[in-house]
Amino acid sequence: MNRSAERRPLALLPVAVWALLGALLPGTAAARTYPVEIGETNEDELRNLYEDGLLSADEFDTLVELLNNPIDVNRASRQELYDLPYVTLATARSIVLGRRKGPYASLKDMAERVEAVTPDVLDQIQPFATAAMRERSGFDKNKVTGKARIRTGMYFEEVEPIEGDHANRTHTPQQLGYANLPATQANADVTYDRTYSAGAVVLSQPDIRGIAFNPQSRDFHATYGQVVQLGRIYTAVEKERWEVIVGSYSAGFGLGLTFDRTSRTQPNGWYKDLSVTADEFYRQFRLPRRLFGAAATVYTDIGSWEMESTVFTSMDRYDLYQYDMGMTGGEAVDWTEVETDSPRVYIEGQKVGWMRMPNAYRESLAGVNTTFSDGARSSVGLTAYAGTQDRTVLDGMNNNDEFVIRGGYPVLTDTYGAVGLNGSWGTGMVDFFGEYAYSFTGGSGVLVKSIINPTGGEIELSARHYGTEFDNPHARGTAAPDEYQGMRDRDEQGLRAKGFYDITEAVRFTGTVDYWRSNLELAPLSSLMMYGRVNTWVVEKKFMVGVYGRRTDQNLASSGRGNVYGGSTEDLYEDIQVESGTYDLTEATDRSGTRNFTGMQVRVVPIAPLDLSALYQRTWTDTGLLYPTEEGPCEYWYQIGHYGWFKARYKVIDPTTVTWRIRYRDDDIHGSRELRMLDTYLQVDQKLPNRWKIVTRGFMGWNLVDSEADFKGYCDRQGAPELSGSCVASPNAIDDDTEAETAEKFGYVWLSVEKRF
């Protein structure tokens, strides 16, 4: 999008005390960082950081989106630049001011002209930024630019034979012999004269197809095979005072509380979208739930201010996970009050489970946004949208009430929407943002944020209040990862502080504290998440040590080793005892425990071509697990797990890089809960002349046999509200005649070929 001036959301959070504290901090100004150095150039490595617990889900989604749709430093607003790794708000402002003297010819040119963009910052942002949009005069460049890529992969899994099989037994596609076919993604994105652009993504992969609903049995029937589909397609025109896109795109405004279908922290309009992600172990390529339609933006000068007006519309079909569907028998029901069953799905007569139902419903929506900006740090914007659902798009589905979507949308209505006001203001080293949104069903949400840039660091403070009736399905504001009826931005109050501080030039501290509470109308449940990390570089950046830890307490009122970490709010309600109008949480067993982990990461660069790194972390989780004492009775303890990997990256010659990693994970070192596995991969990156690049990876994993503890069968609470000393270990807990198990193998291979021009 064309963003010739900065646009910021509204400011409401008073932070004078924090500002005074920040002014007293010593040190050298630095750039914003994610909880860990990124330094990765593909989705697979970013996913590894997420699986390590070093990136949150929101941070992972943001970086993947920027990897697929890099930020143009010549056109992005300050709040959009803020999403780049190692870019503070002050750095983003310097980038915007620097381009007033003329557009940047390249990212390297930007680093030379903007002092805050150090070599370390440039190294971090290169995979996620571009300087593609430049003035047409003064640059001798080709009129046609772009890239094309084809990526193909195949997943394989060793499946145990099913004994006593029958058609109505639930199978996975792998057990039926399906899904062991290659999945291929081909995409191209081309720009002409830096004004006209077009792109498309074509997918070919094994998937369910020909799905139809049988109204008599209320079952779904389908076949399975190779499916070819046009996943994404768009064309766009971007002029100085207006721009328009038709096809696939994403859009968001302000702090994302009214409308946001992007993965950015502070979106500012619409974005081209060719995003495709691979699911776990590359069984399939998936399309994020974005928009398909048209959007247009017009820029108008009003005195010293600029008005940005955007209209957008979308109509597209979306997939739905089988167990998010609730069959209602053709009646309009409240799925939160009436139990609904998931549908039965048959592939060629065999019952299957855990399926993603393709093109299960259609969503249509339209919206508008108008933002006024002074071109510096002040702005105000108004956003509104309305949407509706059609759940009759599958063959044989003639009634919109034949099934409901359990979570993520308002209950008992097929139409929804929201209207909201956002804005910003800044002075000195402090910037304020805020947004208020009101959903059409009667609920409201408020999010306020302040970002402070003292010398030597950055502090981001935010406060949020989302009402229980605020059921806006397209809100994406700051929120805890838990959900209420499938929505994060609902039924929650919270405070969050995050930031970093450079203790010295070689030592950085990064931290986050997030406190929130939910279920306000029934029984307040408080939660707290604290994360801290210290990174230290020594010996001229040849050796780095990072030490980190996280603690999540899901209920400050009743946390302890006798509780259960995880579970749903609905499960907790059943355990709450109501006495004389008060709520007794002593019997609550869900959402009450804690999960803690700590770890260390080491990176060594002994010689320039070789980069070695390793990580080890240990977890402690409240799961209601009991263990026997010498006297016989059982006592509570944490479920303990550990996790580690070693990775080596070697640049054989300048255009060739080889990466190898081996990883081990055991979620319960004293028992057999959850996973115990070992995996390894080998990846080769090869650059070729004329801007060609080939990347290939081979991955192999083993689900290892995990023998049960002798006392597991007797001392595992399994959710029952037992007290300490309520069970006695037995030496006969394990049957020695049990047939020996073997490790299960799985893996994948993929190849990517890319051409830039």
Image (cartoon, helix red, strand yellow):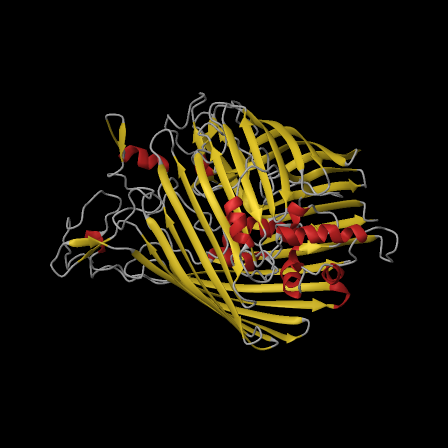
Seen in the picture, residue 254 relative to 529 is either above or below; the reply is above
Quadrant of the image occupied by residue 390: top right
In screen coordinates, is 45 left or right of 52?
right
Instruction: Residue at 57% x, 37% y: name it.
Output: 434
Q: Is residue 646 visible?
A: no
Indicate the position of residue 663 as horizontal and vertical percent values: 45, 65
Seen in the picture, residue 347 relative to 219 is either above or below; the reply is below
Of 416 and 269, nearer the camera is 269
Specify the quadrant that holds the C terminus. bottom right
Instruction: Residue at 75% x, 35% y: name it.
Output: 305
* Image label count: 0
Quadrant of the image occupied by residue 242: top right
Q: Residue furthest left?
A: 631
Specify the quadrant that holds the N terminus. top right
Of 742 and 691, nearer the camera is 691
Indicate the position of residue 492 as horizontal and vertical percent values: 44, 36
Of 313 and 581, nearer the camera is 581
Q: Is residue 270 visible?
A: yes
In screen coordinates, is 616 left or right of 373?
left
Q: Residue furthest top?
A: 331
Q: Residue furthest bottom?
A: 607
Seen in the picture, residue 650 relative to 701 is either above or below; the reply is below
Indicate the position of residue 160 as horizontal and vertical percent values: 38, 56
Instruction: Residue at 46% x, 56% y: name it.
Output: 53
Of 133 and 446, nearer the camera is 446
In screen coordinates, is 309 left or right of 752?
right
Indicate the position of residue 303 as horizontal and vertical percent values: 79, 33
